[in-house]
Image (cartoon, rainbow, N blue to C red):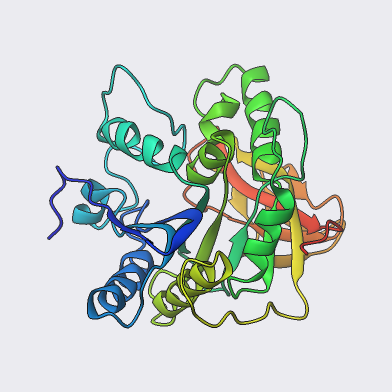
């Protein structure tokens, strides 16, 4: 079992020339094991010589939250993928991880963060914003990040996380809530990577228990290595078509008796006017436009994210 007191990284520096610095994370959430399995497979190839990093730098972190991984749960003491930043006064276990992980991220150019999800569904990639000089998530590498996302394998690409999260945080502040009311709490690994001058994506490899999920992560790591030119290996072309979605709104659960009208799965389609849920006082929650229900959480606590709403995105990927 991985020691919960150790954060382990494996780095491979190519000696044939300079190149990008890629970091790959697994098990940011401890019950998402596809990342560790995918990374272990790549590590075995590197150990045997079947794969050789010739340029740049590859860093592999199979288990990013060893306490959560040892417990087999999403978090150790809190969600590592929220409010991620170094601190001079670490308290929770994830604070100690952040103090090690954040400098690692800042020392690289590109991040691939491997995750999985609870409900059935197909893999998808979470990308960041378009290039902008705003205050929420300024960014200048959207084209490179889009090309990176396009070559990882999945054909569903989702954007808009920080904007939707910040809007939800603003509503919570208006209601006098404190939990999740700070937009910076939406900062996870990829957001920290972009703020540090790099770019990166979250790859949701499939359902937690899907035996194919580690294969999705493994192929994505190899595609990333090939795309960035870290090794001499074939690069598969991107798919011909993508489903591009943008998160436009987060709806919070306001009361423990708020309920969904059906057992929604992430990315289920809804039509304008469709009944999605019902508040504890009988007020219906209605879809304002055609779109998709994303990340529905039947166990959400009052004042926290209940589900996200997404619409088709017109933003190109390549």
In the rendered structure, the answer to whether residue 132 lies left or right of residue 238 reads: right
Query: Residue 208, percent across and down?
Result: 40, 69
* Quadrant of the snapshot with the N terminus: bottom left
**Vertical order, 41 against 101 (above or below):** below
In the rendered structure, the answer to whether residue 4 lies left or right of residue 58 reads: left
Q: Nearer the viewer, residue 152 or 233?
A: 233
Q: Residue at x 12, y 51 (%)?
A: 3
**Vertical order, 202 against 269 (above or below):** above
The image quadrant that residue 131 belongs to is top right
Q: Residue at x 14, y 42 (%)?
A: 5
In the rendered structure, the answer to whether residue 283 lies left or right of residue 80 reads: right
Q: Residue at x 71, y 46 (%)?
A: 160
Query: Residue 251, percent across and down?
Result: 67, 42
**Vertical order, 26 against 222 (above or below):** above
Query: Residue 217, percent across and down?
Result: 45, 71
* Quadrant of the snapshot with the C terminus: bottom right
Q: Nearer the viewer, residue 136 or 228?
A: 228
**Vertical order, 186 against 189 (above or below):** above
Q: Is residue 280 visible?
A: no
The image quadrant that residue 32 belongs to is bottom left
Q: Is residue 229 visible?
A: yes
């Amino acid at each position: 079992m991985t020691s919960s007191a150790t954060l382990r990284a494996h780095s491979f520096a190519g000696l044939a020339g300079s190149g990008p610095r890629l970091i790959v994370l697994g098990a940011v959430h401890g019950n998402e094991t596809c990342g560790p399995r995918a990374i272990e497979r790549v590590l075995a190839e590197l150990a045997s010589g079947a794969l050789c990093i010739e340029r740049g730098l590859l860093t592999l972190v199979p288990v990013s939250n060893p306490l959560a991984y040892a417990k087999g749960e999403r978090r150790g003491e809190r969600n590592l993928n929220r409010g991620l930043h170094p601190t001079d006064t670490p308290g929770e276990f994830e604070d100690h991880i952040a103090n090690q992980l954040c400098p690692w991220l800042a020392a690289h150019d590109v991040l691939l963060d491997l995750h999985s999800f609870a409900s059935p569904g197909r893999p998808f990639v979470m990308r960041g914003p378009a290039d902008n000089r705003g205050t929420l998530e300024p960014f200048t590498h959207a084209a490179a990040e889009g090309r990176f996302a396009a070559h990882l394998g999945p054909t569903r690409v989702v954007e808009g996380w920080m904007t939707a999260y910040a809007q939800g945080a603003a509503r919570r502040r208006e209601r006098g809530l404190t939990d999740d009311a700070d937009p910076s709490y939406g900062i996870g690994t990829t957001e920290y990577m972009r703020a540090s001058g790099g770019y990166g994506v979250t790859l949701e490899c499939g359902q937690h228990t899907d035996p194919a999920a580690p294969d999705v992560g493994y192929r994505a790591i190899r595609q990333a290595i090939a795309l960035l030119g870290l090794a001499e290996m074939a690069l598969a072309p991107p798919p011909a078509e993508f489903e591009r979605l943008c998160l436009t709104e987060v709806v919070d659960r306001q009361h423990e008796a708020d309920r969904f009208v059906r057992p929604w799965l992430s990315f289920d389609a809804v039509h304008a006017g469709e009944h999605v849920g019902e508040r504890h006082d009988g007020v219906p929650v209605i879809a304002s436009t055609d779109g998709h229900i994303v990340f529905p959480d039947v166990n959400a606590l009052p004042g926290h994210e209940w589900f996200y709403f997404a619409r088709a995105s017109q933003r190109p990927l390549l």
